[in-house]
Image: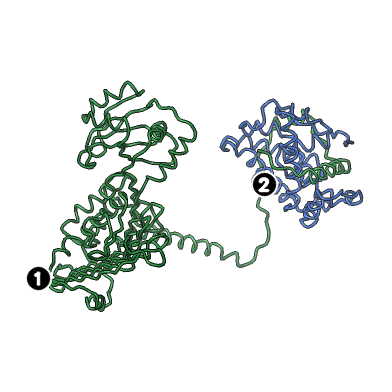
Chain colours: A blue, B green
Amino acid sequence: MTRACASPIMAVPISEPAGKAMTVEQFFDRYAAVFWRFFAVRTDSDQHAADDLMQQLWLQARLRGGAVRHGKTEAWLWQVARNLLRLYWRKRAAAPADLPEVDSVLAAQLARQLDRELLPDELLSRREVRDQLLLALTELAAEQQILLFGYYFDGKSESALAQELAVTPRAVEGRLYRARRALRDKLAHLQD
Amino acid sequence: MSAPKNPSRDQMLDENLQRIARSISLPAAPPPERIHAWKNAAIEPWTDVRVPQKRHRLFRLWPLFTGAAAAAGIVLAVFVILASPRPVSAETIFNSLRAVLSGPVSITLDIGFEGVTLSGRIVKDVDASGASRSYSEIHAVLKSDNPEWSDLESVTVVNEAGEQSWMFSRGSGGATPEERGPDGRYHVTPIELCYIGRLPEFVRAKALHLNVPSELAFGRNDSFVSYEFDAIDQRYLCSLMELTEDIADSQNLDDLIERVKSAAGDVRVEAVGRDWRLRASAYQPSALFPELDLSLPDADLASILDHFTLEIEVIRSVAPRGMSIYLKPSGDEPLRKLHIAVNTLDLFKLAHDFPVAEEFAEKVRPLAREVTIVPGSHGGTAVRIKGYDWKLNTSQRDRLRQIGTEIVRGIELLIDYDGQSGSVRWAEFRNLTPAGGTIRLQPGAIQLDPAVLDPKHWITDATEITEIYE
């Protein structure tokens, strides 16, 4: 199997077993790269903007994270990230014209094709198609992103991912399967 | 548990993701030192910045709208608070039931047994002077799936109206063992009896003409057949009769209410919308269900004992034989409470030989891990035994569950209570056995067709008429 070259994105080293209840700050440390990617995609790779947003996310995690109930950490942090992004664009007069935008119809069409036929190269070369894929990928749960980006984009093996996530390779195989399905489902219901 | 996989589709997903990874370039990831920089940067949290914009003039009315909405909300909240019924106690609901029963009331019966169905109505009317008049019409039908009997049906009508009292009884479609018909079924000449009199004893004694509710009898002289209820149905019928008699007799209302309360092993008051409902379930021996009688093989009893904490209670007043055994669930078994009177077991013999609880406990103690003497639930003394030393296999455990399902008979009383008026709308006894059925009590006497109140409506040429006057 040929793989894409390893992307420069690096996950924060993980020492805690997956699934264990974490504080918001721990969660931030663990999945900082995931949130950064989320911001970067939605600010047209404006690193300064993404940095500002990450600082604000960290600040919110410090200030209000203690009140978040166990088990709700990830959902809370994602909601804060979305709110910050909304606030960021509201503070600016207008978003750049070439910012990735959700095209629900196109995304749903991609979802239907994804597990039925090979996506043609010309389709993948279209900017709007790549945008839908990126928007969907970066909306997945943090661990699913770690798996998909690690396996497909960074070329990590299942055993390497298993070590990173402190699970068995067999578990990685199952989670990868679910992550692929989650991506397809996310595309099918992608919304702005 | 992992989701079932579709290999071909998943393989396609896998290959497409590889293609996507090759064609998409991701934003460059931040180095770890940048992550530390985010944390250490001295920044202020963003606040929700209002974006100045020109608003439509109707927005000037916004405070008016919000003020009106707030006022409406307050009014609505006050209304809901005032209109909401206050929580009531079970005692209050029982007292309300007592008030219902002391006035005019109509009762609809639809009770199923294994072989027979009882249906009909009982109406009690109370006039302004307090004098009561009652009418009951009970139909008993043997179920048609009985291979030997025709659809045996009887009707007993009792009209208690002072000097105009009368009782009519008719059996039809019955059979006798000596008179098997050409269809292979038994046939019998039905009887029709009518007693007309002034306050006759039959009216006072029994409303249902089932003096000893062990059988339904049909026919006359040499053409006589009967249907015998089994032991449990007999007790149920007995309870039913006592209940209807007590309802008809206002003097016994206190006793009736006490019996209803004692019958309820589990009483709770539930909110239903803006009203309340009292739910009383009786799975235990009580005035309505005096005792469940069962003979079990040793293995079955052993199976039961293995699952349940055993409690042997000496209750002379309730159980005529003086001994009974209570079994309570010790784990997550589906049975709430089981009451079995056994007569074939060593334990029962032990209990029989040693009616005094302390002596019995001494006898049992060597066999059990824990034996305690506690106050009985019915005023007697109970001996609680845990960890009786019987070993069981799986089939015995299954048999236990089956037995439990078979023998646990229950009745549930539902009382619908109007939280606004503080009165009972209706009450219903529900038969929780598979046969099902209900006895529904409704305040207020229903209007009866005058024709059915006249004995001539029922009498035919075959009716034997007896006039009784005191």
**Residue A174: which quarter of the image?**
top right
Mark 2 burial class by Cα count in 10 Å: few <14, some 14-19, many 20+: few
Q: Quadrant of the N terminus of chain B?
A: top right
Horizontal side of residue A96 vs B129, given as left or right: right
Q: Residue at x 22, y 76 (%)?
A: B455
Dot 2: chain letter: A
Q: Eyeballing the image, is B438 above or below B312?
A: below
**Residue B277: which quarter of the image?**
bottom left
Which residue was labeled with disc 2? Answer: A83
- Residue B425 visible in the displayed image: no
- Residue B144 visible in the displayed image: yes
Q: Secondary structure at mark 2?
A: helix
Q: Residue furthest left?
A: B470
Q: Eyeballing the image, is B446 above or below A91?
A: below
Q: Position of residue B81 (x, y in %)?
A: 38, 57
Callout count: 2
Q: Position of residue B421 (x, y in %)?
A: 30, 62
- The one nearer the camera, B115 or B177, is B177
In the image, what residue type sits under mark 1? Tyr
Which residue was labeled with disc 1? Answer: B469
Q: Quadrant of the C terminus of chain B?
A: bottom left
Distance between the alpha carbons at the discs numbered 1 and 2: 92 Å
- The one nearer the camera, A173 or B212, is B212
Check chain identity for marks 1 and 2: say if they share one: no
Q: Position of residue B398 (x, y in %)?
A: 47, 38
Q: Eyeballing the image, is B54 above or below B283?
A: below
